[in-house]
Image (cartoon, grey):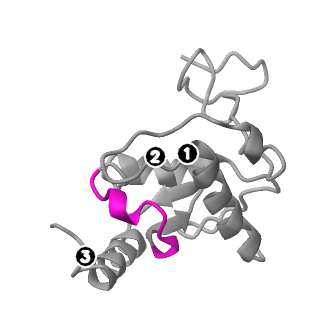
């Protein structure tokens, strides 16, 4: 099946739209971060969502260019949450959730591919680097 957008011939991904036309939620601006008061309950960590957004924005602002670190595609002017991929998943390694070395800026396609287990050599190498960096602190 094809995307609902008249001029688009991409395959449907969700809600009758292709991955290029599904609305994405933007990260909250730094001024808005104080208004977000939802907490993420975690055994090891009780930081709130605004902490994660602030962490992502800090990484975004450090970068001069916003290109996918895997394929080189330009990511745009606004950071979106999917662009910040945890190399070692935060569900399995919550202690690395706020480690900048564990974050890779990626496009949606590269994030989806990694999540589904289709890793490029570059992503494998970066994961290995993170594992080596935090080897003593990780419970592997």
The verdict on residue 99 being magenta is yes
Comes first in the chain, label 3 or label 2: 2
Question: Looking at the image, is 120 positioned above or below residue 21?
Answer: below
Q: Earlier in the sequence, mark 3 or mark 1?
A: 1
Quadrant of the drawing holding the C terminus: bottom left
Q: Are marks 2 and 1 in contact (CB under 8 Å)?
A: no
- Which circle, 3 or 2, is nearer the viewer? 3
Q: Is residue 51 left or right of residue 28?
A: left
Q: Which mark is residue 68?
A: none
Q: Which residue is mark 1?
A: 48
How far apart are labels 3 and 1 at the CA level?
23 Å
Outermost residue on the left side: it is: 140
Tell me which residue sits at (50%, 55%) in the image. 110
**Residue 106 location in percent, x, y?**
57, 60
Q: Nearer the viewer, residue 11 or 29?
A: 29
N-terminal label among 2 and 1: 1
- Residue 46 falls within the magenta-colored stretch: no
Q: Secondary structure at mark 1?
A: loop
Q: Which residue is mark 3?
A: 137
């Amino acid at each position: 099946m094809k995307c609902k957008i008249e001029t688009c011939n991409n395959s449907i991904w969700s809600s009758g739209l292709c991955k290029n036309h599904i609305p994405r939620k933007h990260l909250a601006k730094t001024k808005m971060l104080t208004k977000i008061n939802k907490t993420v309950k975690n055994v090891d960590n009780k930081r709130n969502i605004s902490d994660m957004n602030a962490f992502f924005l800090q990484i975004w602002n450090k970068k001069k260019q916003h290109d996918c670190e895997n394929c080189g595609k330009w990511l745009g002017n606004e950071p979106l949450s999917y662009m910040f991929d945890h190399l070692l998943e935060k569900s399995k390694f919550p202690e690395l959730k706020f480690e900048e070395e564990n974050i890779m800026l990626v496009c949606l396609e590269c994030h989806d591919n990694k999540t589904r287990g289709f890793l490029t050599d570059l992503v494998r190498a970066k994961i290995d680097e993170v594992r080596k960096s935090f080897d003593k602190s990780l419970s592997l």
